[in-house]
Image (tube, rainbow, N blue to C red):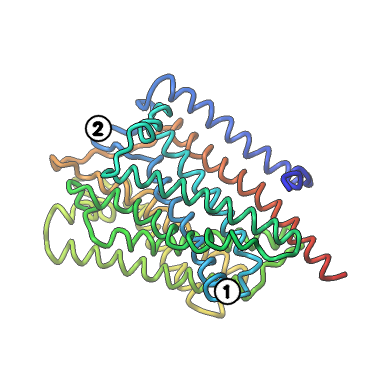
């Protein structure tokens, strides 16, 4: 079915061309990084995780969100998700691929990946993170592709696929839980040393991923003959709303614990992010923008009269997606490093090559998603034409 992705209008090929251009620029910067080293990035001794790991962390959540469609569809037989669950699985494939690429560019020399395979260390969280991420990618490829093949032939999915579908549910939870343990298991970083890090990750994941999926489904509806269905989109929107409320609630719990206990080490990171610390306030505008977008997104998704209007729905989903991206993709990682164990502040400034490489990886994910969605849309359009006949 891959040949279906080779057919498209001028806008389609223009979009593909733009993605390839971004990938080319980023690849050139990556070659420069391979030749020069990670010194070209804004990372340092005090801040050893930057844009790369921040994007990895965020995209793990986007990948895990596919389970919010799989559970209603396959465990509760919610038929409204029949035509859209494949789009969630394909989004997970693109997101996990980007996660793996961000890890590769962050470790410097890609050959270092072999160390995990040649010298497995089960007591390392990184070892288990490799297992769950690659496993989740394989599961979604198997389930997504075979489900689409069955849809093309207008037959039920093969029986042997069902175990993989059910396995994907706990596996989706595991990929973000293990990623959260990477942070919560570091005792020297007080902002991350919290028992609710994994629940926070899952709550933000179930808000960010489905909100992006809604935006993609609205885009699919506008550029093709396939209609995902208003009820399905509204149902996903409710999931986004409740998950985002829980996410904000968990963040408020972190503030209460830190400031009511009045323990300086637990307060400093949050102070740096939202008010500045020792004259350093680079991320303060970002974090307050995240808070504002969270309020806007929740309000729109919570009011049925607004949520049911396509324009407001798109604004609400975009607000929540950007809010969670700033919170987890910017504030969480950088804030955890500030202040350092010596109580000094070293701010982080991403460099142009670092940003270009990150954009290129996002472009690779978008290209994968474009190809997979093009194939899925063509199959869905054939089904619509057949039903009409």
The image shows residue 271 at horizontal and vertical percentages of 22, 54
Q: Nearer the viewer, residue 351 or 87?
A: 87
State how far apart marks 1 and 2 are (Cα).
46 Å
Q: Quick check: marks 1 and 2 in contact, CB under 8 Å?
A: no
The image shows residue 109 at horizontal and vertical percentages of 40, 26
Q: Is residue 261 left or right of residue 306?
A: left
Q: Relative to 269, is 306 above or below? A: below
Circle 2 is placed at which residue position?
45
Q: Relative to 144, is 111 above or below? A: above
Q: Which mark is residue 251?
A: none
Label 1: which secondary element: helix
Mark 2 Cα-neighbour bin, 10 Å: few <14, some 14–19, many ≥20 = few
Q: How many marks?
A: 2
Residue drawn at (73%, 61%), measured in percent from left and top? 380
Q: Nearer the viewer, residue 285 or 14?
A: 14
The image shows residue 226 at horizontal and vertical percentages of 73, 63
Label 2: which secondary element: loop
Q: Nearer the viewer, residue 53 or 182?
A: 182
Residue, far right: 389
Residue drawn at (83%, 66%), measured in percent from left and top? 386
Residue drawn at (37%, 55%), measured in percent from left and top? 327
The image shows residue 95 at horizontal and vertical percentages of 51, 49
Residue drawn at (53%, 37%), measured in percent from left and top? 360
Which of the two discs, 1 and 2, labels the residue nearer the N terminus?
A: 2
Q: Is residue 243 left or right of residue 311?
A: left
Q: Which mark is residue 234?
A: 1
Q: Is residue 359 left or right of residue 387?
A: left
Q: Relative to 126, is 376 above or below? A: below
Mark 1 Cα-neighbour bin, 10 Å: few <14, some 14–19, many ≥20 = some
Location of the C terminus (image quadrant): bottom right
């Amino acid at each position: 079915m891959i040949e279906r992705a080779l057919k498209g209008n001028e806008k389609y090929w223009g979009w593909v061309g733009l993605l390839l251009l971004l990938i080319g620029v980023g690849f050139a910067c990556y070659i420069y990084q391979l030749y020069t080293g990670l010194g070209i990035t804004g990372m340092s001794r005090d801040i050893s995780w930057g844009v790369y790991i921040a994007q990895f962390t965020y995209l793990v959540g986007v990948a895990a969100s596919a389970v919010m469609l799989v559970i209603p569809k396959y465990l509760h037989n919610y038929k409204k998700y029949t035509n859209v669950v494949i789009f969630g699985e394909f989004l997970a494939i693109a997101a996990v691929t980007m996660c793996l690429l961000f890890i590769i560019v962050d470790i410097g020399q890609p050959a270092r990946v072999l160390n995990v395979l040649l010298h497995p260390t089960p007591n390392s969280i990184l070892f288990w993170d490799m297992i769950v991420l690659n496993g989740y990618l394989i599961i979604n490829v198997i389930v997504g592709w075979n489900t689409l093949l069955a849809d093309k032939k207008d037959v039920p999915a093969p029986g042997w696929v069902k175990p993989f579908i059910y396995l994907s549910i706990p596996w989706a939870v595991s990929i973000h839980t293990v990623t959260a343990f990477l942070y919560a298991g570091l005792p020297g970083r007080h902002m991350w040393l919290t028992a609710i890090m994994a629940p926070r990750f899952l709550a933000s994941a179930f808000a960010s991923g489905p909100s992006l999926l809604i935006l993609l489904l609205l885009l699919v509806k506008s550029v093709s003959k396939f209609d995902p269905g208003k009820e399905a989109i509204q149902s996903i929107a409710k999931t986004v709303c409740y998950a985002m409320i829980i996410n904000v609630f968990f963040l408020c719990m972190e503030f209460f614990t830190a400031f009511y206990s009045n323990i300086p080490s637990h307060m400093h990171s949050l102070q740096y992010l939202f008010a500045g610390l020792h004259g350093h306030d680079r991320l303060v505008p970002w974090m307050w923008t995240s808070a504002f977008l969270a309020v806007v997104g929740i309000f729109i998704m919570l009011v049925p009269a607004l949520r049911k209007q396509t324009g407001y729905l798109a604004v609400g989903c975009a607000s929540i997606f950007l809010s969670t991206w700033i919170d987890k993709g910017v504030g969480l990682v950088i804030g955890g490093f500030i202040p350092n164990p010596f109580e000094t502040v070293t701010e982080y400034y991403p460099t142009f090559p670092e940003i270009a490489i990150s954009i290129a990886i996002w472009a690779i994910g978008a290209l994968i998603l474009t190809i997979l969605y093009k194939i899925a849309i063509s199959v869905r359009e054939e089904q619509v034409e057949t039903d009409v006949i």
